[in-house]
Amino acid sequence: MRRRKRGTRGPAATLWNSGTSLDRQMLEYTVADDREWDARLLRWDILGTIGHAEGLRRARLLSVNEHRRLVAALRGALKAVERGELVIGQEHEDVHSAVELWLTERLGALGERVHTGRSRNDQVTVDLRLYLKHRVLDLHALATALVGELLAFARMHQRVLWPGYTHQRRAMPSSAGLWAAGYANGLIDTIESLAGLWPRLDRSPLGSAAGYGVPLPLSREAVAKVLGFSGVDHIVSGVQNGRGKLEAAVLFWCAELGHELAKLSTDVILFSAEEFGWLVLPTELSTGSSIMPQKRNPDLFELTRARTALVEGDLAQVMALKGKLAGGYHRDFQFLKAPLVRGLDTTGEMLAMVAGAVPRLGVDRTRARASLTGDILATDEVLRRVRGGEPFRRAYRDVADAVKRGEPTPAPSDAALLDARRASGNVGNLGVAALAARLRAADRWRRTERARFDRAMRRLATGR
């Protein structure tokens, strides 16, 4: 078979050119930086195409032999991607044209038949859903690892008392354990919520084409099963109408993880400062100053806090792009990929970095306990009187008056402070085991879905 030379379809191979001349400047303007982001989808586009080819065979739009040859070539394309031989170059408009051109160079007209019954609109959507399923399961695992480190920190330091704050003013006794367990709890809430988002990721859009289906006897359900989806996006017009909505939901999930990371980072920055000194930041997790030799700076946590703002910015960009568009497909959707991929990458970097930092944080028990002085124990004194039978309002007023007069507040022992806080989830009764049980349940869910997803991708890639 005579193969076409790469790039013979003009300055960039497109799937929509019907033979008319193309304005190169216009083409590059419309492509913009899409090739860079499409590179992340190359493997998923090939796997999605293998699934689509199975649908064409079942609809008798491909013969058994044609299907066999096409799938073999696509599996060869996967290996070429792994070897770095199949890449998206300047001769391609996007990931779809790169894969199809690779096929037609090897299979001729048979390669051109692979696009039967689909549009780039449902093709990119299936690519993104496969990519998202893979990435969010990875992020779920990273978040789970971070929670595990926070729970270990909470267990180790659950009896280390230090002040709790409201309005950035000292409020009531807290502990290093409660501090870590609180962030673990918030992260677990977000980790668990992925199971609610997952069914939206786990529906195949193939067969919706440009949003209006195709006049062919395709079995959308069979293709979904081959691709490892639990079902289909049933109404074909809903696939394009929903563009941006799923990306926003995933980025919001990432932003929720970032919410905990940013607050934790700010606490570490404050609590490790000289004025506090409760947390000790090891030298290897800090940076120096180019002019002040004594400085050790918490850049890791400052930049984590900043990165959470970047993720929120990516979410805002998606929300702005998708808003107020009419129904159906719009080329605006092309720019959804960059903030989505960036946000996922940034979230993964943050989770991995903070998970590695938490177990290396030191705790200065002496300085932490020394901070529990004076007025911070006023509420304990009020409630000590209440336990003795005094009405709350009277006790509150009396203690307030004593504080105004400068009288010292009685200081209970550490054991008494902890024992008085035995209600579930309190300083003296963190319930770390209950949090760990929730984490294990979430991890079992992830492992189940990861195994199901990986089995489907392995069958597509190898036939086994």
Image: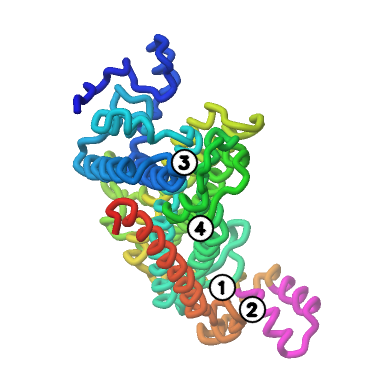
Q: Position of residue 81 (x, y in %)?
A: 25, 41
- Residue corresponding to mark 3: 340
Amino acid tagged 2:
Asp
Which one is closest to the eye, mark 4 or mark 2? 4
- Residue corresponding to mark 1: 173
Q: CA distance from mark 4 to mark 2?
A: 54 Å
Q: Are marks 4 and 1 in contact (CB under 8 Å)?
A: no
Q: For residue 100, what is the image quadrant? A: top left
Q: Position of residue 348 (x, y in %)?
A: 39, 51
* Label 3 crowd (10 A; few <14 / some 14-19 / many >=20): many
Which one is closest to the eye, mark 1 or mark 3? 3
Identify which residue is drawn at 44% across, 46% down: 55
Identify which residue is drawn at 43% across, 68% down: 443
Decide if residue 61 is on the left or right side of residue 316.
left
Element carrying mark 3 = helix
Q: Are marks 1 and 3 in contact (CB under 8 Å)?
A: no
Residues shaded magenta: 377-402
Amino acid tagged 3:
Leu
- Residue corresponding to mark 4: 230
Amino acid tagged 1:
Pro
- Residue corresponding to mark 2: 380
